[in-house]
Image (cartoon, helix red, strand yellow):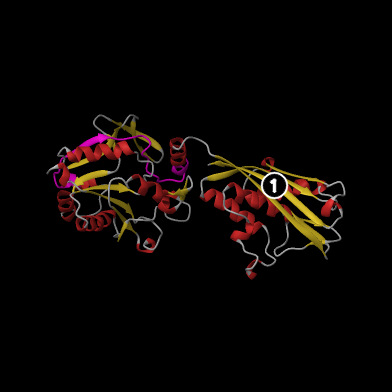
Amino acid sequence: MMQDDIRFVTILVAAGRGARAGGGQPKQWRPLAGRRVADWTIDAFRRVGDIVLVLHPDDMGLDLGDVHRVTGGATRSLSVKSGLTKAWALGATHVLIHDIARPCVNEQVITDVMNALRRGAIAAAPGLDVTDALWTESGGLVTGARDRAGLMRAQTPQGFSIGEIAAAHDGFEGDARDDVEVALSAALEVTITRGDEDNIKITHPGDFARAEAILQRRRGGMDIRLGNGFDVHAFCEGDHVMLCGVSVPHDRGLLGHSDADVGMHAVTDAIYGALAEGDIGRHFPPSDPQWKGAESHIFLKHAVDLAASKGYRISNIDCTLICERPKVGPHAPSMQAALAQIMGIAEDRISVKATTSEQLGFTGRGEGIAALASATLVSA
């Protein structure tokens, strides 16, 4: 086959549920370094050509950009066969079959597989030497050792001439660990290309941290973001004010659409600001009656979760409350504890303090309370 006649299509197998990875949702849709796992994987193959995404029926409506979607089967093998059918229809001569849960695959690994196929290989797949000693075990005890000579760790993408791998799948019974196993069952010769230690497969909860570190390293290290928030609420009738999650006795209340927690609002806006995500009003419009009287921890928790979904964690918070009364100092430790619990960070990363305006302006006249907050976010 001439080089100009070769047409690659990528098949990304994404129909599994990935329960071992935890998180309450399929691992491919969980956030990783500011995006979903699947988004990283899809982008890695865009330069190859058409992408066929094999999905669980429940996921067919997800926003996934310019990809071809097919429904997967009850087993991995059936899902791959569904992808192969679509690849045939797209005119593929060769396919790259890749696990959606390998988001750290690099361009060189993909290119090496493609080049092996261009040179005439029927099948090619990346692998790594086994360097650790190998044991057998039973009941948590070592029962023996195995020779590692000739053993390799398999990776994806695994590339094939589409006719040969489709025929191999048609003749294969049961479910295979990967497509090389299917190829070997049909006596296809598989060329080994160089794998990469970073090309990990997310399987267990701890793998997310490893993958995040790899992706962060590639995009230039730690990303630090700073945001500021400012809020004001006027006094009204009442017998207490909510400040940073703590009910503080006072002879007035604070006027607001929600519970008017001026400190928590400033902190929330600081986080939104660091993310370039506007303010509370964008996410919880005051025109929406469902937020009337809402507790402000709802807003703050949303901002923290949004930061996490974008690949950031809260490094520290600094909040200053500006008022003549009530006195904030005695309540500051409780406020720090309340914010820490809502945000899921240590109390020593949160500062709550107060100052007066020396009897100047609306705060000096006792007409209300203002709050200024700063938030530092770092890439997780």
- Residue 156 x, y percent position in the rendering: 29, 43
Q: Which residues are magenta?
A: 183-209
- Which residue is drawn at the image coordinates 47% and 41% (left, top)? 209
Q: Nearer the viewer, residue 78 or 94?
A: 94
Element class at badge 1: strand
Magenta segment includes 248: no
Observer able to see residue 244 = no
Compared across the picture, whether 195 is left or right of 270 comes to left
Q: Residues within 10 Å of mark 1 (few under 14, many from 20)?
A: many
Residue in view at x 82 percent, y 51 percent: 323
For residue 181, above or below residue 237: above
Looking at the image, residue 326 sits to the left or right of residue 231; the answer is right
Q: Circle 1 sits on which residue?
A: 373
Quarter occupied by residue 54: bottom left
Give the image location of residue 70, x and y in percent. 29, 60
At horizontal 47% and vertical 35% (from top left) the residue drawn is 220
* Vertical arrangement, residue 82 with respect to residue 155, above or below: below
In the rendered structure, the answer to whether residue 222 lies left or right of residue 133 reads right
Please state which amino acid type lies under the numbered disc 1.
Ala
